[in-house]
Amino acid sequence: MKPQIVALLGSPLPEGNTAKLLKKAIEGAEEAGCGITLIDVPSLEFSSCREMYYCREQKSCIMEDDMGRMYPLLKSMDSLIIATPVMTMGVPGHLKSFMDRCQVFYCAKYERKDSLIPKEKRKLRKTLLLSISGMNLPNNFDGITITTQAFCDIIDCQLSDELLIRDMDNKVDLDRYPDLMQEAFDKGFNLGKRLTNSG
Ligand SMILES: Cc1cc2nc3c(=O)[nH]c(=O)nc-3n(C[C@H](O)[C@H](O)[C@H](O)COP(=O)(O)O)c2cc1C
């Protein structure tokens, strides 16, 4: 079986710039020989974490919604791509709730000292972060980066590479920037090639 990469789209726009960037990275990862599962996070139906802490003792969440079918994917994947716009200087709400609902992984790893990710997978799993901001401020990506870093630690999928594109309000359309699209392709390819080379 091909190595499997999960791709999370945090933007609500399926044809937007973030989606275009993710599509390029996916093409790269496929070219490298990986299988991709694309998750359109804004279209998932789930609630934010209610802190019921069923996951302190159990390997799952007590809330029954679309997150139930996300956990097995996040456990079995070999690597991850996250593509997200900056919203209010951080991760968009629904994607942030997706990350918060991964407290299931936090409790297993840090409280019970028994990660849900098999040991042999933990070493290999890497995350590529793609992000776009409208403005051009020095701290545009601080929020996204710090949250993604924490999420990647929790799910044992080390943040290893990133492509952060600022000033999108002036750039307008990424199709006008073939170099950036190529960079997304190359980063997706490199993420995938690491997996196909190690298999
Ligand atoms: C609700 C909302 C909040 C935003 N907040 C920020 C922000 O804090 N900083 C910034 O640089 N851009 C911000 N933006 C602009 C987006 O990051 C930018 O338009 C991005 O290109 C959107 O990508 P997409 O069209 O692929 O979803 C915001 C956009 C929206 C809709």
Image (spheres, rainbow, N blue to C red):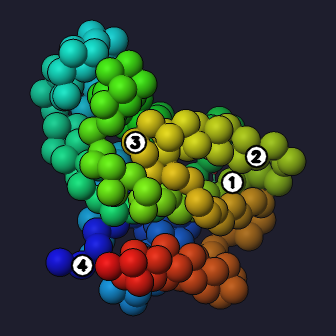
Tell me, yes or no, whether the two marked residues, 1 and 2, touch with CB atoms within 8 Å: yes
Residue located farthest toward the right when viewing the structure as drawn: 138
Position of the N terminus, as image quadrant, is: bottom left
> Would you name the residue on which mark 2 appears?
140
Q: Residue at x 84, y 48 (%)?
A: 137
Give the alpha-carbon distance from disc 1 to disc 4, as whole Å: 33 Å
- In x, y percent, where is residue 22? 47, 69
The reply to whether dot 2 and dot 4 touch (C-beta < 8 Å) is: no
Say which residue label 3 marks.
155
Q: Quadrant of residue 53?
A: top left
Q: Does residue 193 lie above or below 88 as drawn?
A: below
Which element type, helix, strand or loop, lies under badge 4? loop
**Between disc 3 and disc 2, whose residue precedes?**
2
**Mark 1 or mark 4: whose residue is earlier in sequence:** 4
Residue that badge 4 annotates: 2
- Residue at horizontal 63%, vertical 62%? 162
Disc nearer the start of the sequence (3/1): 1
The reply, left or right, for residue 117 in relation to residue 160 is left
Q: Amino acid at mark 4?
A: Lys
N-terminal-most mark, 4 or 3: 4
- CA gap, disc 3 and disc 1: 25 Å
* Vertical side of 21 occupied by 95: above or below: above
The mark that comes first in sequence, 2 or 4, is 4
